[in-house]
Amino acid sequence: MTIDNNTEQTPITVGKLLSQARERMGLTQEAVAERLCLKVSTVREIDEDIKPAGVEPTFLRGYMRLYARMVNVAESELNALLKTDEPIAVSTVSSMQSYSLGKKRKKREGWLMKVTWLIVILLIAMVGVWWWQDHQAQKSELTTMANQNDLILSQQNNVENSTESPSDVPDNSAINAPLTAESTPIDLAPAQPIDTQVMESQPVKTVPLPNAPNTNVTVDRAQTHDEPEAAPMVQDALVMSFKGPCWLEVRDASNKILFSGTKNNGDKLDLQGTPPYRLNIGAPANVDAQFNGNVVDLSRFIKANRPAKLKVPEA
């Protein structure tokens, strides 16, 4: 009775059921593994009720059913044992490791994406700033040219109006003023004798000394006055003559404005400073410029029909 109770108390598992049926048929684990196309280690683990590593529970149940059919075990008996037999918990170390690796990879990809977007935004901002600066420079240049053209047109209108209007009558008081000033000292000065005035107008005769050669030297008092000396030539001089209305700005090497304004037909401008001079001429066709007596070439600006911006002398 004791032996029967012990056998009844021993639970029958899927592995024991399959292994007993296999032994009754005289099959080895290698033969079963060969017929089922499984590893010998997998068949051994099924017989020992050990869950094979790396095998999903669904596939493991399928292997057990194939094993049961091979060793002539009823499927209902196998299913009853499978329901009562709880599957062994699968270790989640590998899955947790893969999840952590995926999380790190996503974090790295997110950081790279942020850096990429930052670089793209910086490039777009730099392009925008460059475009804005170029737009402002073009706008200021167009505004300057428009102001110059308006100034030239207004000067031309003023010249036309001045030619059509009658000339002003000269002031007689301004003409008589110098005459009165000159007549005042004549009235106040004492009259000189006539002989003295005649003597001053006649040439002076010199009397020769004894034992001196006879030389007649006449001194013309009218020619004793000193003649004016020729003016020295100014170095680094810029001379400009105008054939029509023109706006002009001249700066020297220290960025000092030597002249800024407009000139009309027939005007002349003499400037002296520290070269090189920087010229900004609104209408170069109406200007003739010379530096130290040499003509400044403005033909390229006249052909292009645009204001002249240049340095004199050119480097």
Image: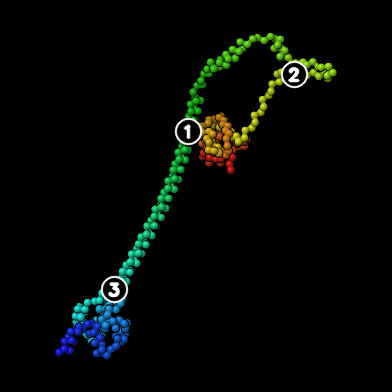
Q: Nearer the viewer, residue 308 or 118?
A: 118
- Give the amino acid type for the residue marked by disc 3 in the picture: Ser
Q: CA distance from mark 2 to mark 3?
A: 140 Å
| Mark linked to residue 151 | 1
Which residue lies at the image location 20% right of the left edge and 83% below the top edge? 11
Q: Residues within 10 Å of mark 3 (few under 14, many from 20)?
A: few
- Give the amino acid type for the residue marked by disc 1 in the picture: Leu
- Give the amino acid type for the residue marked by disc 2 in the picture: Val
* Residue 66 visible: no
Query: Where is residue 197, by image quadrant?
Result: top right
Q: Is residue 281 above or below residue 68?
A: above
Residue located beneath label 2 in the image: 219
Could you tell me residue 276's position as x and y percent? 57, 39
Q: Nearer the viewer, residue 163 or 264?
A: 264
As helix, strand or loop, the secondary structure at mark 1 comes to helix
- Give whichever of discs 2 and 3 has the lower sequence position: 3
As helix, strand or loop, the secondary structure at mark 2 comes to loop
Residue 212 horizontal side relative to residue 258, left or right: right
Q: CA distance from mark 2 to mark 1?
A: 62 Å
Q: Quadrant of the N terminus?
A: bottom left
Q: Is residue 15 above or below residue 158?
A: below
- Give whichever of discs 2 and 1 has the lower sequence position: 1
Query: Where is residue 81, by image quadrant?
Result: bottom left
Could you tell me residue 131's position as x and y percent? 43, 47
Q: CA distance from mark 1 to mark 3?
A: 91 Å
Residue 131 horizontal side relative to residue 79, left or right: right
Could you tell me residue 306's position as x and y percent? 51, 39
Q: Nearer the viewer, mark 1 or mark 3?
A: 3
Which residue lies at the image location 55% right of the left edge and 37% below the top edge? 252
Residue 109 horizontal side relative to residue 296, left or right: left
Residue located beneath label 3 in the image: 91
Q: Is residue 119 above or below residue 167?
A: below
